[in-house]
Image (cartoon, rainbow, N blue to C red):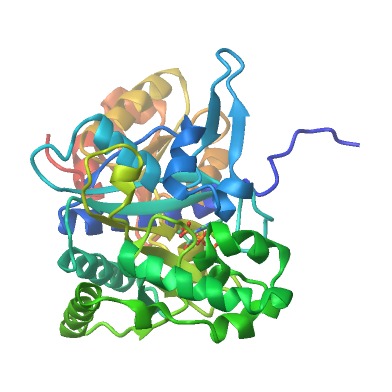
Amino acid sequence: MSTAIQAIRGMNDILPEHAALWEFFEDTVRDWLKSYGYKCIRMPIVEQTGLFKRAIGEVTDIVEKEMYTFTDALNGESLTLRPEGTASCVRAVLQHNLLYNAPQRLWYMGPMFRHERPQKGRYRQFHQVGVESLGFAGPDIDAEQIIMTSRLWKRLGIQDVALEINTLGSSEDRARHRARLVHYLEQHLDLLDEDSKRRLHTNPLRVLDSKNPALQALIEAAPKLLDDLDEDSLLHFEKLQEMLRDAGIEYRINPRLVRGLDYYNFTVFEWVTTRLGAQGTVCAGGRYDGLIAQIGGKPAPACGFAMGVERLLALLEEQQFVAPEISADAYVVHQGEAASRFAFNVAETLREQGLHAILHCGGGSFKSQMKKADSSGARFAVIIGDDEAGAEQVTLKPLREMGDQARMTVAEAGDVLGGKAV
Ligand code: ATP
Ligand code: MG
């Protein structure tokens, strides 16, 4: 029986066979973010537990049951693996006073950790691309964020995602609505499950977010926040919709869209697909004007969203998407003492010209080396025997298309391979 150690459940190795897909995604995302003027920020993966409790809210699925929290054995501090990036990003912005003279358009990409039941599209370590605009009151920036996600789908070739939007109003609207909602839910106490009963007074809006099928009819008939909005809130929502219509973006207003985190207000949105089963939300976000003050900063408006990378990649695979191959320009084979020393030199010269070269390591016959050259996917084999080495030349052989092999200088080989002049 093997006792080899395995990865932790719900935490995946991303193997080289998926490298091309991940790199295509990451490259596209970086370029897309630049085209909208967003700058990259990188935060630590571990933060003080208190940050997430304060930012996300004590009465949420994440804080109640999904966080990886542990005590630092050296100083007794309570630390947590980040379950999302917004709290850390805002913490970093405040700590470094980045909002001092200008608003900020920021993004980050990386692993997040949540202790959930692993299933397709739901993991314990997963990746998000997060985008945050801090210091903008909207609704123009809300619209920008939605319009830019729609452009990303185009660039990635993602189909079958639909936009749902809603507004959560201001905190005053919510207080009014909350009173009406509590009154309604209290009249149906016998129908509520344990979670909902607990949330009825701590966080009644979250009852509407319940996934329990038995509660859906009750949720459907509950008072609607839209009916409790004041004029300013309605105007923000109207303006946003006008900008989306101008940009030709289709959307559906989903009055039940409340989002899982406590810190949202006004605009909330999700991009959903029906092609991934139950885990259909690929991107979610909205406005969170209260958060900065909530974690101790000078009040400032903010808006952001996060995409689930694994879900987007699953969608691409589901559409039979084939990522551009990552293959080397040359695989350098060599035999003999002088040839091997020259081969190192040749491979470095090719790399100097910006080419991708794999140098054969580990010896073996020319025949076995050529097999490796072929299976590496490289476009050409660069063949060096003592003969070539003595003349400071190489033999170049195309591997992916027809054509004869030919002997030439290293500079000529660089030209044929498309290297740039140095
Ligand atoms: P869900 O309702 O699916 O649990 P959420 O509301 O908890 O999602 P957010 O906190 O808004 O999700 O995170 C943004 C995005 O990150 C989600 O829309 C999803 O694409 C992705 N995501 C969230 N949790 C996971 C997970 N455990 N595994 C993979 N992707 C995830
Ligand atoms: Mg969740």
Residue 288 drawn at (x, y percent): 32, 56
- Give ligand 2's quarter of the image: bottom right
**Residue 215's quadrant in the figure?**
bottom right
Tag count: 0
Q: Is residue 356 visible?
A: no
Q: Residue at x 33, y 31 (%)?
A: 347
Quadrant (top left/top right/bottom left/bottom right) for the C terminus: top left
Residue 337 drawn at (x, y percent): 45, 18
Q: Is residue 274 visible?
A: yes
Taking the image as shown, residue 56 lies to the left or right of residue 5, namely left
Taking the image as shown, residue 394 lies to the left or right of residue 208, namely left
Residue 52 drawn at (x, y percent): 47, 41
Given residues 368 and 301, the one toward you in this image is: 301
Which residue ends up furthest to the right in the rendered image? 1
**Residue 236's quadrant in the figure?**
bottom left
Taking the image as shown, residue 77 lies to the left or right of residue 33, namely right
Question: In the image, is residue 418 above or below residue 82?
Answer: below
Which residue ends up furthest to the top in the rendered image? 74
Question: In the image, is residue 391 above or below residue 358?
Answer: above
Given residues 86 and 186, the one toward you in this image is: 186
Q: Residue at x 61, y 48 (%)?
A: 64
Residue 370 drawn at (x, y percent): 51, 44
Taking the image as shown, residue 353 lies to the left or right of residue 226, namely left
Quadrant (top left/top right/bottom left/bottom right) for the N terminus: top right
